[in-house]
């Protein structure tokens, strides 16, 4: 079962998508020289609750010209996929229960899911939240990420805020200021190029490598703190029972 929609556009658009109860995917990408926004809704079968959900889905324009698509499915049925192609400069708001979300090339994304995974190969500003799903960002100018038990992985980003309860935080290269907070998850930062870093955990370990003259404050109750650097740092480390290794 498949439905398709097309809307002529003269520039960037705001996209608002919702895929509720049903498993599946929301996938949105930017295409250069795009003059027609395309929305596709699909599921493997032509019959059954998933096909009915696609038939009943709404696609409409909002009061401010945003493109809105909402689909309410059925738990345990065949997965549904919502795909969108949009012009450069577009923004995305997406909400799901168990479905995964993927976003590529958008100026700003605001993504929230209960147990689905979030994947952002590239975007300008990223707001991402998941209760138990994985969050992966390949490249972002600015990222604000929150999970409860799912892991956070960011390969390259500017200013970053990452909060988790029990999920691990894995960071590649961070070029802006960084704030992280975790209860039992570990923080690993391969290369910090920003000016200020604040990392707090309860039992999680903190491992940081810095390559700039940064101000770094780290605190944990029972986790270990390990900091290495190629430049002189302004350091403040606090731990109750954990080990501290600093330059």
Image (cartoon, rainbow, N blue to C red):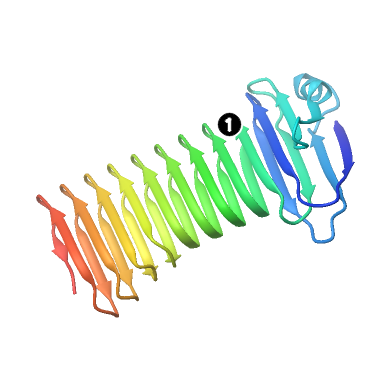
| Residue 111: quadrant of the picture | top right
> Looking at the image, is 131 positioned above or below residue 140?
above
Q: Position of residue 233 (x, y in %)?
A: 24, 73
* Residue drawn 61% across the image and 39% down it: 100
Q: Where is residue 226 in the image (x, y as percent from the top left)?
A: 22, 64
| Residue 60: quadrant of the picture | top right
Q: Where is residue 164 in the image (x, y as percent from the top left)?
A: 37, 43
* Residue drawn 32% across the image and 63% down it: 196
Q: How many numbered discs sit on the rendered protein? A: 1
Q: Which of 245 and 215 is in front in this view?
A: 215
Q: Residues within 10 Å of mark 1 (few under 14, many from 20)?
A: many
| Residue 19: quadrant of the picture | top right
- Residue 99 visible in the current orientation: no
> Looking at the image, is 112 positioned above or below residue 139?
above
> Looking at the image, is 21 positioned above or below residue 188?
above
- Residue 19 visible in the current orientation: yes
* Residue drawn 26% across the image and 50% down it: 200
- Helix, strand, or loop for circle 1? loop
* Residue drawn 67% across the image and 47% down it: 91
Q: Which of 26 and 161 is in front in this view?
A: 161
171 left or right, relative to 228: right
Image quarter where the C terminus lies is: bottom left
> Looking at the image, is 80 positioned above or below residue 190?
above
Residue under label 1:
98
Q: Where is residue 137 in the image (x, y as percent from the top left)?
A: 54, 55
């Amino acid at each position: 079962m498949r439905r398709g929609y097309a809307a002529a556009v003269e520039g960037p658009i705001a996209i608002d998508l919702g895929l509720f109860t049903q498993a599946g995917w929301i996938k949105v990408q930017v295409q250069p020289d795009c003059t027609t926004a395309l929305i596709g809704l699909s599921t493997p079968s032509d019959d059954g609750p998933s096909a009915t959900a696609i038939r009943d889905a709404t696609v409409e324009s909002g009061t401010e010209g945003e493109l809105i698509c909402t689909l309410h499915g059925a738990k345990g049925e065949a997965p549904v996929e919502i795909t969108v192609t949009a012009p450069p400069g577009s923004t995305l708001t997406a909400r799901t229960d168990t479905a995964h979300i993927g976003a590529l090339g958008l100026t700003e994304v605001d993504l929230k899911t209960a147990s689905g995974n979030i994947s952002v190969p590239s975007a300008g500003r990223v707001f991402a939240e998941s209760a138990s799903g994985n969050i992966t960002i390949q490249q972002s100018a600015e990222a604000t990420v929150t999970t409860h038990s799912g892991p956070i992985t960011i390969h390259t980003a500017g200013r970053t805020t990452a909060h988790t309860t029990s999920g691990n935080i894995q960071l590649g290269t961070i070029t802006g200021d960084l704030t992280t907070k975790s209860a039992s998850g570990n923080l690993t930062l391969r290369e910090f190029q920003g000016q200020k870093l604040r990392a707090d955990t309860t039992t999680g370990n903190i491992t940081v490598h810095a390559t700039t003259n940064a101000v770094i404050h780290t605190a944990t109750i029972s986790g270990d703190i390990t900091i290495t650097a190629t430049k002189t740092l302004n350091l403040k480390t606090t731990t109750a029972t954990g080990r501290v290794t600093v330059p």
